[in-house]
Structures are given as C-alpha cells and as structure tokens.
Amino acid sequence: RVGPTLPVLSDIATGAVQSPTPTVERFVNHFLRELNFGQGVLLSRSTINDQYIALAKTVRKYMMADWLDTGAKRREGGTKTVGYLSAEYLLGRQLSNALLATDLQDIAADALRECGIDIADLRAQEIEPGLGNGGLGRLAACFIDSLATMDVPCIGYGIRYEYGIFRQTFEDNRQVEVPDSWLSLGSPWEFPHPERQVRVDFGGRTEQYTDDEGRERSRWIPGWNVLGIPYHQMVPGFRNHTVNTLRLWSAKATQAFDLQIFNSGDYAEAVRAQTFAENISKVLYPEDSTPQGKELRLQQQYFFVACSLHDFIENTLPQDFDLHHLPERIVFQLNDTHPVIAIPELMRILVDIKGFDWDDAWDITRQCFAYTCHTLLPEALEVWSVELMGKLLPRHLEIIYRINKNFLEEVAEAFAGDEMRIRRMSIISEHPERSVRMAYLATIGSSKVNGVAELHSQLLRDKVLPDFSGYWPDKFTNVTNGVTPRRFVFLANRKLSDLVTDAIGDGWVTDLEQFKKLEPFADDPNFRQQFAQVKQANKERLYNLLKARDGLDLPRDAMLDVMVKRLHEYKRQSLKLLHIVSMYDGIISGRVSTESVVPRTFVFGAKAAPGYHIAKETIFLINSVAQTINADERVKNVMSVAFPANYNVTLAEKLIPAADLSEQISLAGKEASGTGNMKFALNGALTIGTDDGANVEIRELVGDDNFFLFGMDEPQVEELRAKGYDPESYYQSNENLRATIDLLASGHFTGGDRRLAAQFVDNLRTQDPFMALADYQSYLDAQARVDEAYRDSDAWTRMAILNVARTGFFSSDRSMRDYRERIWNV
Ligand code: F55
C-alpha cells in the first residue's frame, strides 16, 4: 500500500500547491527555469528538443494543482470510477491538447515569441505516442478526453509499449516497417512511479487443498513473475479544472528472478532473463483484426490487467474497504476482448486471496464488468488455446472452466435436452483445437455488452452472439461511437472553429449538438463563401505540408478525395483503386475528354499489418498506380494520386479538415462503426459510402441528399453469398470493369511486369472475398453523382455545411453520456 500519508490535501488547502495565474511574463519565467534547471541548458545553447521539453513541462505545471485536486476529490468522494481497460491508446500529440485544455495557447505563443521561438516549431518536434493500431485505440483516447471534460471519475489503464505502431516507409513502392522509438528524445508527459511497482505472477501450477473451514480450494503456485511499473499521464478536461489519470504499465524484471539465476552463476542467462521479462511491454502488436495467438500477447494482456486490478483494489480504494461493495465503486469497461482475462483475475482475487465464496465473488464480478465488442469479422474474435492458457495462467484456466461449468448447467436447465445449444454456448470450443472463446467469457462475465453503432449492435445480437442475446436480451445494448470535438474540430480545424464560433458562439466545444444552429447558415451566401474559403485554406495547408513532408506537388484546385484507414480487404481500398484506374483508363483511351472531367486529387493513408500479404500487395499497387498517373502528361491537372507514408493521428489532423470527399466504402456488414467517417463529416466533407457501421446513422442525420450512398446492403450481401458469389461474372459482363482490371493486369503500372499486379488481380477475379466487383458499378455511378454535385460548388458547400450542422451527435461526449445511462450507472 502506498501513498496514504501523502500530504496532498493539506498542500492544496495551505496553498503550497497552486496553479500560478498565467501571464506571459510568468510563462516566460517558468519556461526559462525549465530550460535552465530542468534541461540544464541556456536558451542560447538550447536545441528545439530542449525547448519542446521545457515548454511541455511548463504547461504540465499549470495542470498540476488541478490534477492533485481531482485525485484528492476522487479519493474523498467515494463515488464510482470508470476503469477503462484498453490494450491500446492512440493519443496523438499531447502539447497542443494540453495548451487547448488549459487555455494557454496564446500566452504560450506570446511567451515563446519573447524568447525568439516560434511555438509551431516546438509543436512539430513532438513524436506522437502511437500506442494503438487504429480505430479502437483512438476511440479509447477520445473517451478519456470526454470523461475528463465531463468530470466523470475515470482511470484509463493500459500498456506503456516501448515501441508503438511501426513507422511506415516506402521502398520501391513497398511498405517497409521501421520501429517507432517514440521515447528516444524523452517523453515529458509521463510520470514514472517505480515505487508503486506491482508484482505479476505467471506460469507454475495449481494445488488443491482443504481450508480451515473444510472447503475445497485451489491455490496457484506460480513459476515466475515480473514487475509492473506505472507511468501516469494527465488527462485534462476542457477548461474545467478536472485532470484525470491515464496509468500505463511498463514491465521490469524482478530481482528475485535475476538473483536465482545469478546465484547459479550464469550471468549471461540472468541478463537474458531480464530481457525476457521486459519484453512484455516492449512492442505493440501491429495486427488490427486477426489476433495472432502469440504467447507474448497473452502475457501482455494479463500483465496490464493484473497490475490494474491490483492498483485499483489495493491502492485506490480506502484501506479497509469491504469488497462486497466493489460494484458501487468501480465499473471496468473492457475495450474489446483484449483485457477479458480481468474477469477470472477478479474471481481469483476475491476467492483465492480474499476468501470469498464462489457465488458471492461471481455476483460481484459480473457487476464490475461491461464489454464492448468492436468487430463482426469471425477471424477477429479472440481465442486462446487451452494449452497455452494452462501453461501461462493455470489458475485462471481452472476458474474459466468453473465459470463455464456453472453457466452451462444453467443453460441445460433452461433448455433441457438441447445439447447443440450447450455446445454452441460453451466458453470452450473444441475445434480446430481446444480453446477459450474470449468474447463468450466477456459476455457471460459482464453486466452489459455493447456494439459500437446501431447496425453493428443489431448484427452482434443476431449473428455473432445470437444464443446469448436470446438468453439475456437486456444485457445487450448499443452505444454509437463518437470522436472528441476538441481534437478533431477545435484543434485540427482552427479556421472552421472560428467561423462557427462567430456564427453560433463557442458552446459547441462541449455541446456539439449546438452545431444544429448552423443549419440556417447553409442558406446564407456570405457564410457559404467563408466556409468555402476555410476549406480552401485547409487544402493549402495540407499541400504545403505534403510538399515539405513527402515532396509531393499537388494541384491547388482539384476535388480532394480522401481514403484514410488501416489497410484491410474488407475496407476495400481495392475498390477505390478500381475507380481511379477506371477514370484514368477513360481518359487515356479517349472515351472521356479531359475537359469534361472534374479534376480530382486522391489521397490514401494506410498501414498494413506486416504479415498481411494481400494488404501489402495492395499498398504496392496503389503506389505504382500513383507513380504512373502522376507522371502521365495525358492526365496532368485532372488526376493526381498521393499516398503519404505513415498515416497517423498527427497527419489525420491535417488531412481531414482539407477533404472534400470522405471514402467509407467497406462491404456492408463488415465495418463495426468507423470513426474517421464522423471526423470527416464534422469537418465538412461529404461522404460516399455503403450502408455500413455508423455510415447508416450519418446518412440518417444528414439526409439522403447530402450523402452519396452506393452498394449492397447487408441482407443483399448475405443473399448474394448464399446464392454463390462469382466475381468473374462481373468481370465478364461489365466492359468498363474488364478494361480497368485488364489495364491493371497489363503491367502498365508496374514497369511492364505483369507478375507484379497478378496476385491483386487474381485475388479479385477468383476470390474477391469482400465483393468489390459486385459493388463496382454502383460505386462508379455514385462517383458520377459526386462529380455532378461538385460542379456546382456553391450547392456543394451548402451540403457540406449541412453535414457539419447535422452530425453533432457524433461527439464522444454523447457516447459517454450513453455509456453512463445505459451501462455504468455513474
Ligand atoms: C486491434 C488489435 C486486435 Cl487483436 C484486434 C483489433 C484491433 C483494432 O484495432 N480494432 C479496431 O480498431 N476496430 C475498430 O474499432 C473502431 C472503434 O470502435 C470501429 O469504429 C471500427 O469499425 C473497428 O474496426
């Protein structure tokens, strides 16, 4: 137990800890002090990095009193906390967000100017912590931002990966992954607390025994252990003096571990063992949909979950707390199945350590957890082989078996004789190998289960977990995702923010439904003109960045058509590529004159999981097509394709506000929600999209006239699949499609080498698992409607304004209200 005697409260009460009232002069002072006494350099000798660190630490100071205060208030209050358990947090840069939250942007900029420094140079110095893969990790970051802004007690728990998502580079048009050493220049935002280390056990075996009261019990005799060191980060609310905490765990070898081996005299082996332990938080797994059943990954999951539960129960709750009341003080939200091992871990704590009866412990445990599912793809549902689980966490496996046995007895009683159902609902699947279905464990061990958009929640009930939703209809609910307006509107689109604030005031920043008040302005020609100017300025900003960052020269006045998201077959970057090649083919074959086309710039951003072969082939082909098209005089000024490497949060913040057209073209029924789609609409891009995920809700809100819908809906996809899908028939019957695919296959884009496009083309023609060819014509027709609409630029701007005005629903503040009401009871 740590910290009960820290004199935090009295410090604040006596004024020993207080936020300085910000003035430019004070800020200069603090900054120079950080530079001189923190970094140990003179201003005249300081590097940009010194200056960045000093600035960050200065801003940090202005949040410190609020942080301590929030912590003290939480401890005193005895209220319920949200423990957000997530293996990923894709935070993005911290400096701008902290300056925004504390309202220090202008003061800091002025103060630095007085020191002869341009704050923009320091902002650019920050390496974003990429501790997540994509949507799921970014969602966690949006949620903790909203909870702080709404002053909801929340601790974000996760892993402090030493290496986040890889940095993507291109060599000969192919993706090459470079380790992301985000910590290499120091991270001023984290507070390490090695003294608060937590021990985590692994391996070994269990032993049965009879306790003093004659009860049969099991005890875990672990084989090895590691330490978890917490690193704290501030999570500031927007100008509300709340600062919550994000607690990320880093693995360290225990001394006992080393000593044992040192004593055996094998120095090299001891060092190797240390590395082994510290590997646990070394690197983020870069798969965003097909979890590899790797032992290290299970170690990571249990590691951070065990640390987090221990931290909350032993160090956050009052010392004498009666754990029978645990559900009154915590709800752990499980961000997908990655932290689901927390369920048997809490059972282990209650039963094995605290001596609770099984039934009492189970009753408490279920009330403490809620589970969010983020997928519909069967291959994305996590399973762990029983063999591996038994080797790494033998006691947890026993607990899972007992949970399963009790549950299946309950099912057997409710559905007497229905053997099939019992087999279907078992946590343990028998094929292809005995394994633990984590989504089932999560569903059985949670009080609530939610999907992330209306359609997704419906399909989750009907297709993924039908037996469970039939059995517990009230357990299932929906919370549609959202994004934080602070980062994705206010920070990313300052010009739009100013325009909007002039029109409707600034209440929208924490109440995004106020965007509705913009609706009348769609009919105001003056406002439309200003809105169009903002979009143009954002484009210029982007093109300047892409010129400096990637050496790209892009035309200033084309429609900007953007597809940014992880590279995955179901998201169908392939379909986007077919559209581009088809447009290009139309022009070079003379079917279409350059005068008649609406000029477009296509931008892609996408990382592929390093082992995802076809995804990497797609990247290669996009780059090859881009290279060819950009060099072809015949399409000069009417088509260009850009694929800046290493799409991340930082680049998203520049790209999204500049976009005219948002590509959300997944096969219906595959994208759980999407959140990029929301960011684009909120920044005044129109969507071309399928009836999938949150697109459905976007379209409902903005109206059919302001959304370009195409493609099959989910029932049609199912119908076609049932009928037998034959991609080749589309190739044969659609002349345009055939020409497009033939051009791709011809080697035209790959220096004459047909082999280089062969896998991509063959995959489409023979498998096409996500039915790009079936939706091709519908997609091209929709793109023609986009062109038509874009020709009338004033009408387009009107539609864009209506998109902004009608999508305030997609604030993560609203998502958090929904979680509070439907799930957490906080
Ligand atoms: C990461 C690791 C594994 Cl093992 C599996 C999945 C992921 C991951 O990153 N998933 C992910 O990003 N899912 C996305 O979640 C978003 C937020 O809910 C959704 O909007 C999006 O549809 C979904 O694909």
Image (cartoon, helix red, strand yellow):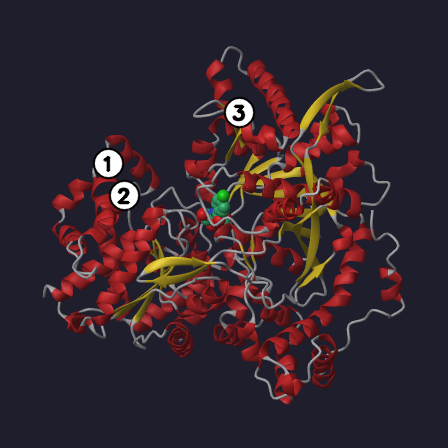
In this rendering, the answer to whether 256 lies above or below 628 is above
Whichever of labels 2 and 3 marks the residue nearer the N terminus, that label is 3
- Residue drawn at the location 48% of the way across and 22% of the way down: 430
Q: Is mark 3 within 8 Å of ligand 1?
A: no
**For residue 189, above or below residue 220:** below
Looking at the rendered image, the disc whose residue lies closer to the viewer, 2 or 3, is 3
**Viewer-closest of 167 and 592:** 167
Q: Residue at x 80, y 47 (%)?
A: 78
Residue 405: x and y in percent read 61, 19
Q: Do callouts 1 and 2 mark residues in contact (Cβ within 8 Å)?
A: yes
Q: Residue furthest top?
A: 417
Q: Is residue 453 visible?
A: no
Q: Which mark is residue 725?
A: 1
Q: In this view, which residue lies farthest toward the front?
A: 265
- The label shown at residue 428 is 3
User: Which residue is disc 2 drawn over?
Assistant: 771
Name the residue: 64% across, 28% down. 394
Residue 89 point in image, percent of width and height: 57, 54
Are dots 3 and 1 in contact, CB under 8 Å?
no
Position of 270 with respect to 130 (left or right) is right
Image-quadrant location for residue 149: bottom right
Instruction: Provide the secondary structure element on which disc 1 rests.
Output: loop
Q: SS at mark 2?
A: loop
Q: Amino acid at mark 2?
A: Met
The answer to whether residue 51 is seen in the rendering is yes
